[in-house]
Image: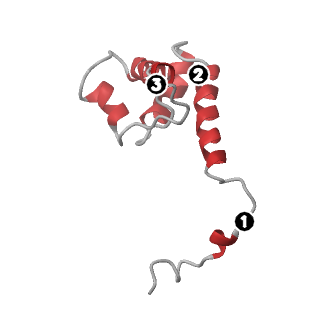
Amino acid sequence: ARDSWGFDGAIVSDCDADDDVYSRHHYTATPEESVKKILDAGTDVDCGGFVTQHAKSAMSQGLITEGDLDKRLFYQFRLRMRLGHFDPVGPLDRISMVDVCSP
């Protein structure tokens, strides 16, 4: 998506879809091989925790590198910066939850 579409955002899996690559679709022989395939496909955020659970052993096996994970962090933090998560508190941040969706 990034290269062919020129997409420069973060790519997020459906919840538990990354786990499905291994446990339901049996696309790879091990969870660690699935992590490699998932990262190679461009997924930046794993909704469900599968990549988080198996990334360390995938790295120990030499299937992924620290650079692979750094690339994912780059896209995640760039998105958060675009959303203003690190900006100073603004006027909209000062609206209390009591006032949200109130008449």
Q: Earlier in the sequence, mark 2 or mark 3?
A: 3
| Position in image of residue 4 (x %, y %) | 46, 19
For this view, does 84 lie left or right of residue 15?
Answer: right
The amino acid beneath tag 2 is Asp
Q: How is the image coloured?
A: secondary structure
Q: Are marks 1 and 2 in contact (CB under 8 Å)?
A: no
Instruction: Indicate whether 57 appears above or below 99.
Output: above
The residue most toward the front is 5
Instruction: Kindly state the secondary structure of the residue where label 1 is placed.
Output: loop
Any mark on residue 5, and which? 3
Residue tagged 1: 89
First-in-chain label (1 vs 2): 2
User: Where does the image place residue 11, in percent across and percent down from the top left?
Assistant: 47, 34
Left or right side of 84 for 6? left
Q: In screen coordinates, is 4 left or right of 79?
A: left
**Residue drawn where x is 63% and y is 22% of the image:** 66
Instruction: Characterize the local packing of mark 1: few (<14), some (14-19) or many (20 or more) Cα atoms within 10 angstroms.
Output: few
What residue did someone put label 2 on? 68
**Residue at x 40% of width, y 42% of height:** 48
Please name which of the two marks, 2 or 3, marks the residue nearer to the observer: 3
Q: Image quarter for residue 60? A: top right
Q: In the current view of this chain or complex, which residue is farthest to the right?
A: 88
Q: Nearer the viewer, residue 6 or 94?
A: 6
Q: Amino acid at mark 1?
A: Val
Identify which amino acid the numbered label 3 is placed on: Trp
Q: Secondary structure at mark 2?
A: helix
Position in image of residue 6 (x %, y %)? 51, 25
Which residue occupies 40% across, 36% down?
13
